[in-house]
Amino acid sequence: MDGAGNGELFLIVDDDELLRTRLARAIISRGFRAITACDYNEAMRHLDAEKPQYAVVDLNMPGRSGIELLESITQFSPYTRCVMLTGYGSITTAVEAMRAGAWNYVTKPADTDQILSAFNSRPERGSRSVEIQYKPQTLAETEWEHIQRVLADCGENISEAARQLGIPRRTLQRKLKKRAP
């Protein structure tokens, strides 16, 4: 990918409206076309209409995850290069994204140039470059992410999630009241 977009199409999928619109404007200013979606379902409607050359997909979204979307994009539009974007970078999620078909993986905060450059380089499979590129998750971030996944798996039922996690319900409620790390 060079500096001029030549009208190639980007699909930007992120539940953060401000990030989504700013990234779309920045990409358009570089000569690309851009369409945006806030979740899996909206992104799939766009994929039915046209096949973008590039996609930037947020890992954590309400409803179906960015990994699920990445797998669907790979299936329905195999020539679309996807970069996974996340605020909670970890080796585990990077490997999971790459296995699902991501071209590359970028942690937030990232500017447009960093995202665009991620489409130029692809980490070699089996290399340890992923460990160097991404800051490891803190214990608090890992705990928060795990709690959110279990809670989602339990249909947001706090009592069931507490049972699954092996902690008292009130402890889980206190943890959920705190801000994400």
Image: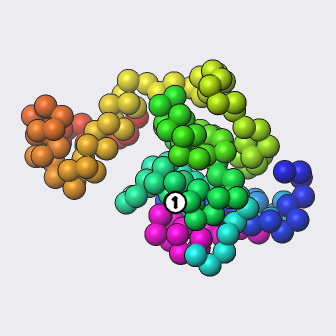
Q: How far across and how far down the image is residue 165, in percent?
A: 18, 34
Q: Quick one: 6 or 169, which is closer to the camera?
A: 6
Whether residue 160 can be seen here: yes
Would residue 44 be counted in the magenta stretch?
yes
Q: Quadrant of residue 149?
A: top left
Q: Quadrant of residue 8?
A: bottom right
Q: How far across and how far down the image is residue 1, in percent?
A: 84, 51
Q: Is residue 169 left or right of residue 118?
A: left
Q: Is residue 2 above or below residue 36?
A: above
Question: Mark 1 is on which residue type?
Answer: Ser
Whether residue 19 can be seen here: no
Q: Residue at x 64, y 52 (%)?
A: 82
Q: Residue at x 49, y 38 (%)?
A: 96
Q: Residue at x 47, y 31 (%)?
A: 92
The magenta segment is 33-47
Q: Residue at x 69, y 66 (%)?
A: 52
